[in-house]
Image (cartoon, helix red, strand yellow):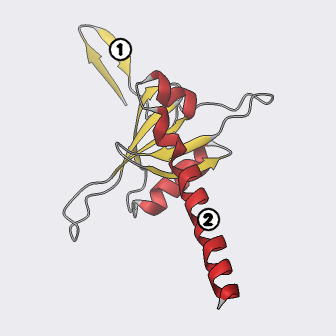
């Protein structure tokens, strides 16, 4: 989209077109988080994380609404959910990109805590079943 402001031509591009390009040798893990929770990840690419966020947000628009906050941090706003009466917001980012913008590192430990709890409860069930 092109507009003129003060005699100067300004070009706006969607955040999707400005998505990070893979750097061959540099591997990045992309995560989906929000203000409070770790949602899903890691993903091998931004595109894979965005596709999952669109599925979680029940995307119906031709192009998802994505804003870029930094080179490794994007905000995806899903369509308004009339049944739940809210609009989910998903942050698609790398861990480094999120930490640079003030997200706490504890948020990225949530999946590790969930895995530890599920594996310890699995062992507990196995030992109680064997003892009966």
Return the x and y of residue 51 as percentages of the image width and height: 54, 55
Return the x and y of residue 31 as percentages of the image width and height: 55, 44
Say which mark, if any, is on residue 120.
2
Question: Marks 1 and 2, how far apart in space?
Answer: 61 Å
Taking the spot 26% from the left edge, 54% from the top edge, the residue there is 87
Quarter of the rendering occupied by the C terminus: bottom right
Q: Are the two marked residues, 1 and 2, in contact with CB atoms closer than 8 angstroms?
A: no
Q: Nearer the viewer, residue 105 or 126?
A: 126
Quarter of the rendering occupied by the N terminus: top left
> Is 76 positioned to the left or the right of 113 in the image?
left
Residue placed furthest toward the top: 7
Taking the spot 39% from the left edge, 45% from the top edge, the residue there is 34
Q: Secondary structure at mark 2?
A: helix
Which circle, 1 or 2, is nearer the viewer? 2
Q: Residues within 10 Å of mark 1 (few under 14, many from 20)?
A: few
Q: Nearer the viewer, residue 11 or 110?
A: 110
Q: Earlier in the sequence, mark 1 or mark 2?
A: 1
Return the x and y of residue 49 as percentages of the image width and height: 56, 49
Quarter where residue 8 is shown:
top left
Residue placed furthest toward the front: 131
Taking the spot 65% from the left edge, 87% from the top edge, the residue there is 129
Which residue is labeled 1 in the image? 9
Q: Residues within 10 Å of mark 2 (few under 14, many from 20)?
A: few
Q: Secondary structure at mark 1?
A: strand
> Is 43 positioned to the left or the right of 14 in the image?
right
Taking the spot 31% from the left edge, 57% from the top edge, the residue there is 79
Return the x and y of residue 59 as percentages of the image width and height: 40, 60
> Is 89 positioned to the left or the right of 100 in the image?
left
């Amino acid at each position: 989209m092109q507009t003129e402001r003060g005699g100067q031509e300004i070009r706006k591009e969607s955040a999707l077109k400005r998505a990070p390009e893979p750097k061959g040798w540099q591997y990045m893990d992309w995560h989906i988080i929000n203000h409070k929770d770790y949602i899903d990840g890691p993903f091998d690419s931004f595109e894979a994380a965005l596709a999952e966020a669109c599925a979680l947000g029940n995307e119906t628009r031709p192009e998802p609404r994505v804003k870029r906050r930094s080179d490794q941090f994007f905000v995806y706003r899903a369509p308004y959910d009339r049944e739940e009466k809210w609009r989910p917001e998903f942050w698609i980012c790398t861990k480094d990109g999120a930490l640079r913008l003030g997200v706490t590192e504890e948020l990225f430990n949530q999946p590790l805590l969930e895995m530890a709890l599920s594996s310890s409860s699995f062992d507990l069930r196995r030992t109680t079943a064997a003892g009966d």
